Image: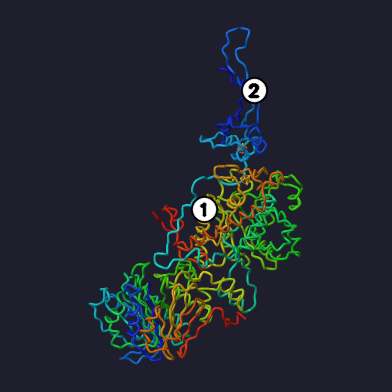
Amino acid sequence: MVSIRSVPSTPSSLTPNDLPWIIKHNENRCTLCGRCTSVCPVGAIKLNYMRKRMPRIVLSSSERGSSYKTFVGIRQRTDPAHRCIGCGTCSMVCPNEAIAPAPNANDDRFRFHTNQKGEPAKRGGRRNVPGASLLDRMIFNRISMLTDPALDAGRHEFQLNTLLGRVLPPEEYLRRKMSGEWIPPTREIFPFIIGSMSFGALSPNMWLGLLQGVAYCNEVLGIPVVMATGEGGCPPWVLKSPFLKYIILQIASGYFGWDEIIRAIPDMQCEPAAIEIKYGQGAKPGDGGLLMWFKVSKLIARLRGVPEGVDLPSPPDHQTLYSIEESVMKMIQSMSMAWDFKVPVYPKISGSTSAKAVLNNLVRNPYASGLLIDGVDGGTGAAYNVSMDAMGHPIASNVRECYLDLCAQGKQNEIPLFAAGGVGKNGNITQNGLALIMLGASGVHIGKYIMQAAAGCLGSERNRCNVCNIGLCPKGITSQNPKLYRRLDPDQVAERVAETFMSIRTEMKKILAPLGRSQSLPIGMSDAMGIEDKDVADKLKIQYVC
Amino acid sequence: MCRLALKTANEPFSPFDVLQAMEAMQEGYDGSGLGLLLRGMEFADFKYETKNPILSGIAHTEKALHRLNTFMQDKGFDLKYDHEFDIDAASIEAKDRHKYFLRVYKLPASWSSFNEEQVESELMMTRLALRRDGESNDNDLTVFSFWPDVAMIKEVGWPLGVGEALGLDAGRIKSRICMAQGRQNTNWGINLYACHPFFIQGIGTMTNGENTAFIPIRDWLTGTHFPGYIGYQSDSEVFAHILHYVIKQLKLPLEAYKHVITPLKTEELIEHPQGEFLRGLRDVCRRLIIDGPNCVMASLPDETSMLVMDAKKLRPATIGGKPGEWAMASEMCGVDAMIPDRDRSLDFMPMREHTIIVPPDRQEFQIWSQFDQFPLPQAA
Ligand code: SF4
Ligand code: SF4
């Protein structure tokens, strides 16, 4: 046996079998074109000269016993920084289907070595919990066709929109109308909202594609879709364009991009759809935004008012203020004032057992326009693994408890609740969204789903890809590197956005028609739903079915 | 599906006339029940004074009747008249009907200082107290209404059969308005409180069809904590409560009801002369938007009657008649049975945007459209 010292073996030495993804390479098909190695975002594979022995039986002593053959092959790198992320870009570019990543069926050992140099693992993307989500398991079982003439999803008209903005109690509305007082602004919008993803986290092409798609949905398809910016501002040309009305501007604890926004106010042609004040994010509660230096390009640096190429961590909370109550109050008021009390202003918080406390605070704040709760399954551009994996609160029970709390106070029509976090994470976008709506949400925010559907994001709950944080997005969705983001054609993204929302609209009708609902969005219609899990049914106060 | 019939006439008539209309429309229901609301009362053997409230309901046991008597006495109500039904008990399916009561009371002397609103509130609280009393005693007491000039009867069985069994064909009770509903409560267990018409503070409504938006509406009404917004054994009860809310709490005109339960679409409101106000009204009353196929008939304390459809007109209805006498029914043959000698060419089947209002003088009915100008200072 060879002494172990002659083989390079360190504590973090891994073999391909220890990694989450193993590259299967078929040498017989490989033409050595080199496309895969050049395209691999993390440099996980390399073309290598390799040598193999060709044993031969020789009888004469003048000849050598074996000869050696040199060949070129693909090798998978096994150091943690260069492990394969399973994105599959190599197989996408391979002309001969010679290469593809395969998930490792064994438990990988890689996970114990992701903390090189004492820096815990970070990633972008998602929480990585495969399998049917709780929302996927909900079924709509109150079929009214049995007793009444059925609605026809293709023929009848359906009112599918929701309201974003504070709604007064009817008595108060009539009183204020009579005395000519201020009526809080509301927006009639499609209940599936493109959730906050910043200009910075997303590539310029992705952002442009989304905005084009949103504009098309509004102006051509008649689907009033809005999208939220996330922290980091909004390109000045958008701020001064008529498209601003489709945009929810986010202000977060880093206040990035707000110089530009405030400066643009006098030149705005229309008001933004709303202002979202970010207090928390479901994927990493208690953590501020993080734009890693890889992504702070010249453009981003200008928009955010920072030097190029530095990490941009936002503080966990709005540090200038003393308490959440005070913070919520002051910020909502100042933001409302900036737009003359004509734009709804609402906070976004991470799912939490304390969500109700924030909600009750908002109920008493006459300027608060809603509450967005982002559940534990929410996505992010960058976060520590531990935050993403272990922190947060699932959205379903959080939003349900808040809704029932509002019902008890008779306020459920006044402060709309929006839910986010894992909506459509397994593709069942409309079903997931409507389930949350029937639990009491006025609408849902979708991020990962729209990246997957509209731009072909490769991420999956089995930790495929998820390197959005380091600016190497193989699809050009979350990269600021022109070489990468040029891969993404904004027109094609826009087309997919339109297709996605058209299909959500049709699916909504397909669900609502059998339930006999067409006149208003079935917010809180909990009698329409069941789940094959007694504990969940009890907790959510819906039916247990089996 | 249920059948609805409403007749309103200047001359009091027997509820049996309306039951015959129910018979004409019999194909549509299963005879699972009958609900009647009579308004503008006239008793053959009693000179009724319209300011005195009438208590309608059923005492299922002697004990319950006794408790009722004691309760009313203790409250200071003075029993003026106790209508004795000529009952043929054998023809009534249910066997626990100790006594149907339809009693006229004089208000307690202590109420004389109350204003109108307080009296209305106290009458409702009295009805609710009696209802609660029945519910906490094994449902041995059912109270349908307690209001001046209104009587209600609800029973399980075939409408005409129930009418005969209760002796309604004898003409001892007459009224100027009669609302009748043949109940087919497919969605819920048999419960007399689930039977139309529904009543709250003088307002009565009845519906056919299914209100699929019931739960969110119920949750919202319950959240107002108004004591009368309870029950909800039927998804249609909310129609009465919404009408009550619109008229009594928001103090809006009757026309607003339609704008609340089936608001116009945004595109339509943009064109509407008071679109901005109505859009706001729709948003603030969003949780009261009804859904599903429904035709709603209602009558109000001043003897106004009303008819509206759901927003898709999935349940049609017809109104017909002549000055002084009008009939509405979910089937045209029902109108025929109630007022055969009318000019049929003047019959009207309202569309989704219409509210039909028969005012107390009953000279003609008004067709009011949601697209019309809305008569309200707030909307100006
Ligand atoms: S799957 Fe992606 S990360 Fe893995 S080798 Fe191929 S290109 Fe590189
Ligand atoms: S494809 Fe891009 S956006 Fe999607 S997971 Fe990979 S890096 Fe993130």
The quarter of the image holding the C terminus of chain B is: bottom right
- Classify mark 2: residues with Cα within 10 Å, few (<14), some (14-19) or many (20+): few
Classify residue B358 as left or right of residue A234. Answer: left
Would you name the residue on which mark 1 appears?
A428
* Residue A2 x/y as whole percent: 58, 18
Q: Amino acid at mark 2?
A: Thr
Q: Is residue B375 above or below residue A218?
A: below
Indicate the quadrant where residue A228 lies. bottom right
Label 2's element? strand
* Residue B12 x/y as whole percent: 37, 90
Which subunit holds the residue at mark 1?
A: A
Residue B107 can be seen, yes or no: no
Classify residue B248 as left or right of residue A381. Answer: left
Classify residue A145 as left or right of residue B17. Answer: right
Q: Is residue B220 above or below residue A497?
A: below
Q: Nearer the viewer, residue B242 or B68?
A: B242
Label 1's element? loop
Residue visible at 64% across and 25% down in the picture = A71
Would you name the residue on which mark 2 appears?
A70
- For the residues labelled 2 and 1, the Cα–Cα distance comes to 51 Å
Q: Amino acid at mark 1?
A: Asn
Tag 1 or tag 2, which sits nearer the N-term?
2
Q: Nearer the viewer, residue A158 or A322?
A: A158
* Residue B131 x/y as whole percent: 37, 74
The picture quadrant for ligand 2 comes to top right
Residue visible at 50% across and 76% down in the picture = B352
